[in-house]
Image (cartoon, rainbow, N blue to C red):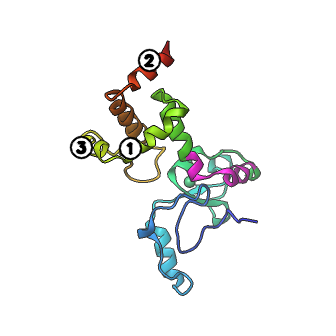
Amino acid sequence: MENRYFSRLGEPSCWSCGFHYGIKYDIKKPSSASWDKILNGWDRIPLQRCHIVPRSLGGADEPSNLFLMCRECHDLQPNTALPDIFFKWVRAQTWGRRESSKIEEALRSFDVRPEQHEELTQLVESPDFKTWLDGKLGLHRPQSNYASVSCRLTPATMIGLAVHYLKSKRGYQNCVETREK
Ligand SMILES: [Zn+2]
């Protein structure tokens, strides 16, 4: 059975969704590294020490009640006095699936139909589109929540720009307008 409670020591990541902060944070040769080196490595990444049972509900501020998670998981976790609920939720978290749902939501926001997904995917990889993007996109600096890293390109940015670009091209405008009627 997969043990979702512990990540690989050499690859610091969220204990809940598994979000990995990139190979620059990886610890080289963890099997032969000293504990000091491993702990220093885990200390460097912005994982948060989250309470399994919240302090407001009597949870202890001790290692047995602490769980290392990314900021987003910390914001989304269930806050109850029952650890079983916390662990049931933790086992179900997957960073990749959460990202997919954000992309789906951005596609829905810009009225992209499922049959247009493939065209959009190809478009964002095309050199023409990449040239057109120049000066039009920015990285989002997160406020208090919903981002695990310091700056990121939101799905709504890329998909919004791709749809805008497509609308200026052949036939796409007609597709969207037909749907809205
Ligand atoms: Zn997480």
Residue 155 against residue 58 in the figure, above or below: above
Which residue type does callout 1 highlight? Val
Q: Which mark is residue 40?
A: none
Crowd rating for badge 2 (residues with CA inside 10 Å; few <14, some 14–19, many 20+): few
Crowd rating for badge 1 (residues with CA inside 10 Å; few <14, some 14–19, many 20+): some
- Please provide the residue range marked out in magenta: 85-98
* Labels 3 and 2: the sequence-earlier one: 3
Instruction: Indicate yes or no whether the magenta region holds residue 91.
Output: yes
Q: Picture coordinates of residue 65 (x, y %)?
A: 66, 60
Q: Which mark is residue 124?
A: 1
Q: Picture coordinates of residue 69 (x, y %)?
A: 56, 57
Q: Are marks 1 and 2 in contact (CB under 8 Å)?
A: no
Q: Which residue is mark 2?
A: 177
Residue 88 against residue 10 in the figure, above or below: above
Q: Are marks 3 and 2 in contact (CB under 8 Å)?
A: no
Q: Secondary structure at mark 1?
A: helix
